[in-house]
Amino acid sequence: MKDSVWFIGALVCAVGVMTILKPEWMKRTADVLLAGWWWRLTAALKAAVGVIFLVFARECRIPGLIITVGILILIGSLAALTVDPAIMNTWLQCVKKWPRWAWRCWGVAAAIVGGLLLYAG
């Protein structure tokens, strides 16, 4: 099942590269996923990914890295789900206004994390 960690790493890396090449694509995707109640579903799916990392970390090449990433994902997701929706919507409105260079920086970070997950998985 470490293949699931590898697959998630490949997906994160691909989204990061796509964001570097076409930041408008990620901005449009974020406009959809961060609107209304969709951000709650996104946070819940992200929490599920964190649980997958924690469950399958022992089978990976670098389990400590996978456990750390899984814990950070869970903390972020649970924080997003427990924060007052008004505060979360204010933050999401700020994210939607990011310039292209900020989306590209996010894409570089995502590609690096995805590459680390690929290596560690």
Image (spheres, grey):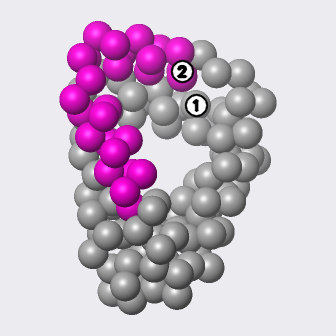
Which quarter of the figure has residue 105?
top right
> Callout 2: 10 Å neighbours few (<14), some, many (20+)?
some
Residue at 65%, 69% (x, y): give it: 115
Q: Position of residue 68 (x, y in %)?
A: 45, 62
Q: Is residue 105 left or right of residue 89?
A: right
Residue reaching furthest to the front: 64
Quadrant of the frame with the N terminus: bottom left
The segment highlighted magenta reads 70-96
Left or right: residue 20 versus residue 54 is: right
Q: Position of residue 62 (x, y in %)?
A: 53, 81
Q: Which residue is at 44% across, 20% downward? A: 92
Give yes or no for residue 77 being in the magenta stretch.
yes
Instruction: Check disc 2 and give the amino acid type.
Output: Lys
What is the magenta segment's predominant secondary structure? helix
Q: Earlier along the polypeptide chain: callout 1 or callout 2? A: 1
Q: Pointer 2: what residue?
A: 96
Residue carrying label 1: 27
* Vertical relation: 60 (above or below) 100: below
Disc 1, SS: helix
Front position among marks 1 and 2:
2
In this view of the protein, can residue 65 be seen by the observer? yes
